[in-house]
Image (spheres, grey):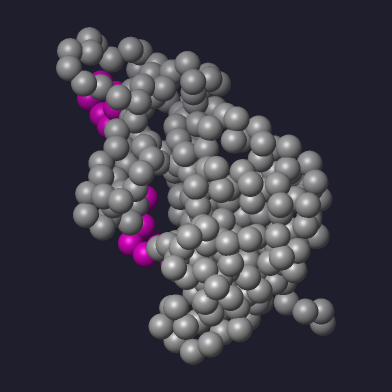
Amino acid sequence: MGALPGIVVTGVAGRMGRMLVKAVLESDRARLVGAVERQGHDWVGQDLGEVLGGGSMGVSVTDDPLDPFAKAQAVLDFTSPAATVEFSRIAAQARAVHVIGTTGLSADDLRAIGAAARHAVIVRAGNMSLGVNLLVRLTRMAAMVLDEDFDIEVIEAHHRAKVDAPSGTALMLGQAAAEGRRVSMDEVADRGRDGITGARKRGDIGFSAVRGGDIVGEHDVLFAGQGERIVLRHVASDRSLFAKGALKAALWGQDRKPGEYDMMDVLGLD
């Protein structure tokens, strides 16, 4: 039996970074070989175990991803768009699986990530949980069946510190609804209403965002017709499910052909 896949976690000081580290350390199928933080962070140069409040782990936090990526078989990345694009380039050079949970990526960012995927495996998803990806599948199916007499609204709620809206998961759900109706989401998305907006346009897919407190993540897809409503819902109460999903994706990506994949591929839902 060969060595366990080596995993690097980026953004280790953040909320998700810590969860990802915990998931790797608790796994008997992977080992932690690197920890990356942004330049100037207090953790840089220190042992990861010690800054997390435990004993020495033998893994130093670095702001230079080149060396840890070169030793890794996979990178778990829930950081920022600019950082993720740069990590995708370096991970591709190292032929390491790059698991991306970063949201708020622009069209230019996605093009750069797509270029990196020509050389290495990239698994990118706005949400890594099994339940959400099942919700995506159900949303697509419902949109195929229900015509434009049913208005579609994606309603999401997250903690007050989340910086992007709509959430990556909400956009996944909106895209699934658009695919179900065989339309372009860019043409039918309604992302904000304020003031006297006029009546809702038939066929639009609306997005509503709530930010407050410590909400982990709640997503509703509302199909509102005349005299009836259908609501598909997912509630996340523990962030560890995202970390476990990301690790599952990293292990799944070993020995796959270069390309861009998502959690539907990982979970066998496509």
| Front one among 219 and 3 | 3
Q: Is residue 222 left or right of residue 74?
A: left
User: Residue 229 sits in which quadrant?
Assistant: top left
| Front one among 34 and 209 | 34
Query: Magenta span covers which residues?
Result: 224-240
Image quadrant holding the N terminus, namely bottom right
Residue 146, x across and y down, in percent: 42, 25
- For image coordinates 49% across by 23% down, the residue present is 185
Magenta-drawn stretch contains 149: no
Residue 99, x across and y down, in percent: 62, 54
All told, the count of numbered labels is 0
- Residue 265 visible somewhere in the drawing: no
Q: Is residue 30 left or right of residue 164?
A: right
Residue 117, x across and y down, in percent: 73, 43
Magenta-drawn stretch contains 232: yes
Q: Is residue 231 above or below residue 22?
A: above
In the picture as drawn, the residue positioned furthest to the left comes out as 195
